[in-house]
Amino acid sequence: MGNYKELIVWQKSVDLVTDIYSCTKNFPKEELYSLTSQIRRSSISIPSNIAEGHSRRSQIDYLQFLKIARGSCAEFETQLIISKNLNYLNTNDFDYLSKKSEEIAKMLNALITKLQTNP
């Protein structure tokens, strides 16, 4: 199974976390314990679940954690839209982060499909 750090989807999702921390530094201070915290936690959940599932060394567990990561990706995308609607993110940052999260979601879908068809 190799090392989860070699997975491109894990690497890209770690990069996404770094990007979201940079972007949320400019969110209003009153959002620190609500939207800022939530969007950061959902982004962190993506690579964390990939790593945890991979480390379980069971394909059934790995698939379950990949599905959780995919769910966190959808949660993250929702929070991005809310952040843009509230004008906390400018259009360029929103487009950049949205594109990255969509790419990660597609990669997670492909990995899940591959594991389900090749037990």
Image (cartoon, rainbow, N blue to C red):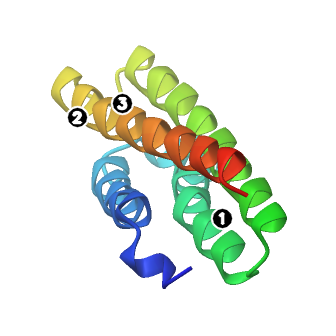
The quadrant where residue 49 appears: bottom right
Q: Nearer the viewer, mark 1 or mark 3?
A: 1
Q: Return the disc, 1 or 3, that comes first in the chain's sequence.
A: 1
Foreground tag (1 vs 2): 1
Q: Residue furthest front?
A: 118
Residue type, mark 3 in image: Tyr
Q: Nearer the viewer, residue 43 or 54?
A: 54
- Residue at the image position 73 percent from the left and 56 percent from the top: 63
Task: Give the mark toward the camera: 3 or 2.
Answer: 2
Residue 117, quarter of picture? top right
Asked if residue 41 is positioned above or below residue 88 in the image, the reply reads: below
| Most foreground residue, 4 or 44 | 4
Number of numbered discs overlaid on the protein picture? 3
Q: Position of residue 41 (x, y in %)?
A: 60, 57
Circles 1 and 3, Cβ within 8 Å, touching? The answer is no
Query: How far apart are the two marked residues, 3 and 2, measured between alpha carbons?
Result: 14 Å
Q: Secondary structure at mark 3?
A: loop
The three-letter code of the residue at mark 2 reads: Tyr
Query: Between marks 1 and 3, how big is the CA–CA gap?
Result: 27 Å
CA gap, disc 1 to disc 2? 23 Å
Query: Which residue carries the number 2 mark?
Result: 96
Amino acid at the residue labelled 1: Asn
| Residue underneath mark 3 | 88
Crowd band around label 1 with a 10 angstrom C-alpha radius: few (<14), some (14–19), many (20+): many
- Residue drawn at x 40%, y 39% is 101
Q: Position of residue 100 (x, y in %)?
A: 31, 40
